[in-house]
Amino acid sequence: MNAQPTVLERAQRVLVEFFRLEAAGGIVLILAAVLAMLAANSPLAHAYEVFRDTPLGGGGWGKSLHWWINDGLMAVFFLLVSLEIKREVVSGQLSNRAQLALPVVCAVAGVAAPALFYTALNQGDGEAMRGWAIPTATDIAFALGVLALLGPRVPLGMKLLLSTIAVADDLIAILIIAFFYSQGLQWGALAGAAIVVLAMFVLNRRKVTRLAPYLLLGLVLWGLVLASGVHATLAGVVTGLMIPHYDRDNAIDDAVEHSPLETLEHALHPWVAYAILPLFAFANAGLALGGLRMDDLLTPLPAGILLGLVLGKPLGIVGAALLMRATGLAKFPEGMDLRAMLGLGLLCGIGFTMSLFIASLAFAGQPAHYAEGVLGVLGASVVAAVLGTAWLAWVLPRAPHA
């Protein structure tokens, strides 16, 4: 009989599956963005706009398909992000202080530096300054999809550091959205939302492990948060934090019982990776290029995004990593040197999903600024992906031939 796999072997297998899923999802995400650009710049442009503006729902819920994707389906994406953050904090990479210091400090620096680049170029324009947070995000699916192109040459430590930085980055982005992109607060709806959150908390404390009550309350919470003026996707974040997770060893295996959090996370991953995020990319990345020139990318708003992601991200991340290593507070992961760290910093400049999402919040009702924001995000993500891939292909050791 075959020996049963150890906990370490099971965890390693799950980790491999996780990165495989993220990488494949990133490739699908790239294809969706390319299709959106082709559709918006072809004879299908009118059909593409009709698709985005298709009305769904009735009464007070009659909104465009574009709205339902950005405010409805993206709440599911944020639910998954929240589940991942909670799992990492309770039983994953973020639960170990020694492993936590480097990615968190890198993530904070990788948010601050791009914001400073953007601010330096746009500080005289009050409307443009609403987009200061656009270049602060990293798209983990896109970045891991690009990293997958390098195959086995990529050390596991680099994948772990990239994913942990991205998780911390997502947490910061969630806080930015909550504090800077909420408006016209309705305190009655907020009070109702607080009661729903309290009900979830009571369920959690009473060790209710069925998912249905949490998800039903999460749906109610989404409606109340939407009515409150806080962005509705944050309901997904709060719901995720309330889902119980009791497996502190994180011994995830199909042969054993999962925690409710793990069960929901596993169920949502393929839907988010292969449906929700590609649909979001298709609905938001379709920028009509007619009349645009290369000079347009050099105007302050898109240039601030481009410089923030392509230069600010690697400067912030690599600078923080060097400082942590010089002070003895952390060391580079196994298999990584300064050159590999620079390549990782470049890949973190792929903002895409979260950057596009923040642009839609920052410039709601301002189509010209939003188009500039999309131009900056797409240009920066392409440049960061090409530079990061080329640099890592040059500096990473080549895999030995079989």
Image (cartoon, rainbow, N blue to C red):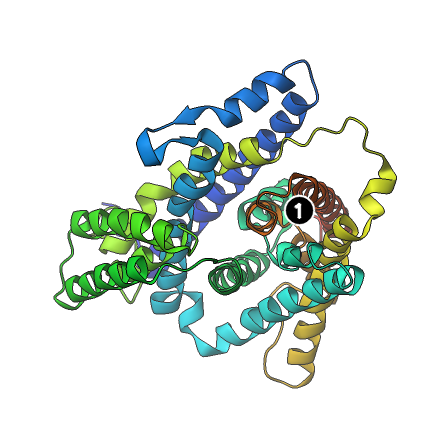
Give percent across and percent down for residue 304.
Answer: 76, 55
Query: Helix, strand or loop at disc 1?
Result: loop
| In the depicted structure, whether residue 376 falls above or below residue 137 | above
| In the depicted structure, whether residue 105 falls above or below residue 310 | below
Of 300 and 99, which appears nearest the observer? Answer: 300
Q: Is residue 245 visible?
A: no
Q: Quadrant of the C terminus?
A: top right
Give percent across and percent down for residue 241.
Answer: 32, 61
Identified at 72% across, 72% down, the residue is: 319
Give percent across and percent down for residue 370.
Answer: 65, 43
Q: Residue furthest right?
A: 295
Mark 1 residue crowding within 10 angstroms, few (<14) / some (14–19) / many (20+): few
Identified at 59% across, 70% down, the residue is: 108
Q: Residue furthest bottom?
A: 327
Identified at 63% across, 50% down, the residue is: 351
Q: Is residue 246 left or right of residue 80?
A: left
Q: Residue furthest top?
A: 43
Q: Is residue 211 left or right of residue 394?
A: left
Identify residue type, mark 1. Answer: Pro
Of 129 and 317, which appears nearest the observer? Answer: 129
Q: Is residue 301 left or right of residue 27?
A: right
**Res. 202 image quadrant:** bottom left
- Which residue bears the numbered disc 1? 400
Q: Quadrant of the N terminus?
A: top left
Of 141 and 64, which appears nearest the observer? Answer: 64
**Res. 336 image quadrant:** bottom right
Q: Is residue 357 visible?
A: yes
Give percent across and percent down for residue 301.
Answer: 75, 51
| In the depicted structure, whether residue 273 falls above or below residue 44 | below
Count of numbered circles in the view: 1
